[in-house]
Structures are given as C-alpha cells and as structure tokens.
Amino acid sequence: MTGPASTAARTLAARIVTLPTRTDSEVRTAVEQALSHNLALRLSYTDAAGHESNRVVEPAGLLTAEGRWYLIAWCRTRRAGRGFRLDRITAATPTDEQAQPHNLTDLLLGSTAATAVRPAALAPLTPARPRHWGSSGRSWAEPGPDRGGGRPVPSSC
C-alpha cells in the first residue's frame, strides 16, 4: 500500500491501542508471521464448549466482528475453512511449510460472515506500545528517575 491510502492506514493505526496479555502478543505475532510469509500455522485451540484441540491450519486472513478478531484459515484436520477466535488460541507457532493459497472470500461463503467487507484502511494487528502523558511531561511508557519502566493504564479505562 502506498500513497494516501498508506498514510491514512498509518494515521488510523496510531489511534488504535489494546492491552494484550503476554499470550495474546505471542499468538498475534505468530498469526501475523504466518499470514505475512504464507506459512502453515500450528495452533492449540479451545472451542466455545471448552474442548481443546491441536491443529495445523493454512491462514487466509483476519476477520473482526462484534469486537472480536478471528483467524480465517483452511483447517487441515477438518478439511474445510474455519474461523478461530484469536482469544481462544492458546498457542500458535508458524511452521516452515508454505501454506496453500486460499481465497478469504471463498472460505467465508456459507458462514455468518459471508457478507464481510474489506476496510477502507488497514492497520497492523499488533499495536504499537501506547503512550500516555503524565503530569511530569513524560509519557507513562518512558522510564523516569522514580520508576524503572512504564506504568500500566488503569483497567477502568
């Protein structure tokens, strides 16, 4: 992406922050690597009923719906397209194996997300570290003489 669309995407990305857990960050990084390098992804997943499974999937893309992120992928175990909620993926590791290309729109056909549309601007899934300004003029993410590192944002935000 270049030009005005790239600038708009960077501007939008700078205004989106999350407070991921350590596991969230590791899963998101693995998913991004697999998508970026077209690699199969080994994952551990817990479904809505609490059943755990280990699978190898071929990622096609990401879907966001109702405040949740989903990995849309071809599941080699089920031999079908599947959506995996990112917050239910407990572990993910890209393999060294190239994934077969799968069309995201085709994998969504027949699902409740079949009418999903692409956003006008895209942003990275892994957010930059948020910066919050304290009364000292330093951001909370900058170490100061009175503390060794950043201060977490209160959970009530």
Image (cartoon, helix red, strand yellow):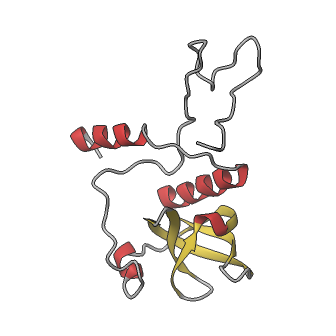
Would residue 39 be found to the left or right of residue 13 on screen? right
Q: Is residue 108 above or below residue 138?
A: below
User: Quarter holding the C terminus?
Assistant: top right
Query: Hey, which quadrant is residue 24 in on the image?
Result: bottom right
Q: Position of residue 116 (x, y in %)?
A: 34, 72
Would residue 10 be found to the left or right of residue 89 on screen? left
Q: Is residue 148 above or below residue 3?
A: above
Q: Residue at x 57, y 73 (%)?
A: 84
Q: Position of residue 32 (x, y in %)?
A: 53, 55
Q: Residue at x 55, y 22 (%)?
A: 133
Is residue 18 in view from this perspective?
A: yes
Q: Residue at x 65, y 79 (%)?
A: 48
Q: Position of residue 134 (x, y in %)?
A: 59, 20
Would residue 82 be found to the left or right of residue 9 on screen? right
Nearer-the-camera pick, 103 or 118: 118
Q: Residue furthest left?
A: 4
Q: Is residue 70 above or below residue 22?
A: below
Would residue 44 be found to the left or right of residue 2 on screen? right
Q: Position of residue 102 (x, y in %)?
A: 42, 75
